[in-house]
Amino acid sequence: MGRLPTQWPVTLRHGPVTLRPLHKRDERAWSQIRDRGQQWFRPWDSTRPPESLDSPMTFRDLATTFSKRARQGTMLPWAVEYQPEPQQRGVFAGQVTVSGITYGSAGWAQIGYWIDPRWAGRGIIPTAVAMACDHCFTTLHLHRIEVAIRPENTNSLAVVRKLGFRYEGRRIAYMHVDGAWRDHEMFALHAEEVPDGMLARLRRPILP
């Protein structure tokens, strides 16, 4: 089996937004955001069905597992950092995760994302997703990126529409989310649909 066309760690930057590897040391910031925004996240968080044999993962378990998969070339688990002011340090603001990376005749992956509610509406996640897609298309030479979103998640739907993802239909009971099997809307983009890159599609500047 040949070596997969990826390397890890990978850090990407565009303006005040940075994608860098998720680390165990992010646990405190991650937990504070998730605790503070429980009502914001709960309707969209994946859950394990009652019949699942998998044990729940702690954040450290998650970071370790994601890092291993990244080194194997099947995942890109990024923390999103945002720099509110030029002289300030970047703050942990969310995650963008590319998963299910498949090469060969498929050449596809899925992307998921979330943002700290206090930074929502600043264009951070559209920029981060655009950077991630550009990396997948130009560096990993993937052909297709998919996004699955619950029909009620208007904030996430706004991201894919802003970036020009193509709607492909609804998948029934696609994923276990918030305690039940939920329908998801499917969106996708192919590399040839964005020959100039995803960042070039963004026109609205990030708010200060």
Image (cartoon, rainbow, N blue to C red):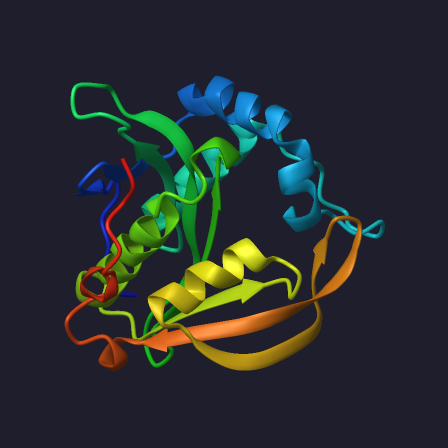
Residue 138 left/right relative to 75: left
Residue 37 left/right relative to 176: left
Instruction: List x then y, in percent, for residue 58.
Output: 61, 28
Q: Is residue 5 something one can see in this rendering?
A: no
Q: Nearer the viewer, residue 64 or 142?
A: 142
Q: Is residue 36 something one can see in this rendering?
A: yes
Which residue ends up furthest to the right in the rendered image? 50
Identify which residue is drawn at 19% across, 67% down.
Answer: 197
Identify which residue is drawn at 31% across, 32% down.
Answer: 82
Instruction: List x then y, in percent, for residue 208.
Output: 27, 35
Identify which residue is drawn at 28% across, 70% down.
Answer: 142
Quadrant of residue 199 in the image?
bottom left
Instruction: List x then y, in percent, for residue 112.
Output: 48, 54
Q: Is residue 110 above or below residue 42?
A: below
Instruction: List x then y, in percent, for residue 88.
Output: 22, 19
Q: Is residue 74 above or below residue 38?
A: below
Q: Quadrant of the N terminus?
A: bottom left
Q: Is residue 167 above or below residue 208?
A: below
Q: Nearer the viewer, residue 52 or 204?
A: 204
Quadrant of residue 169 in the image?
bottom right
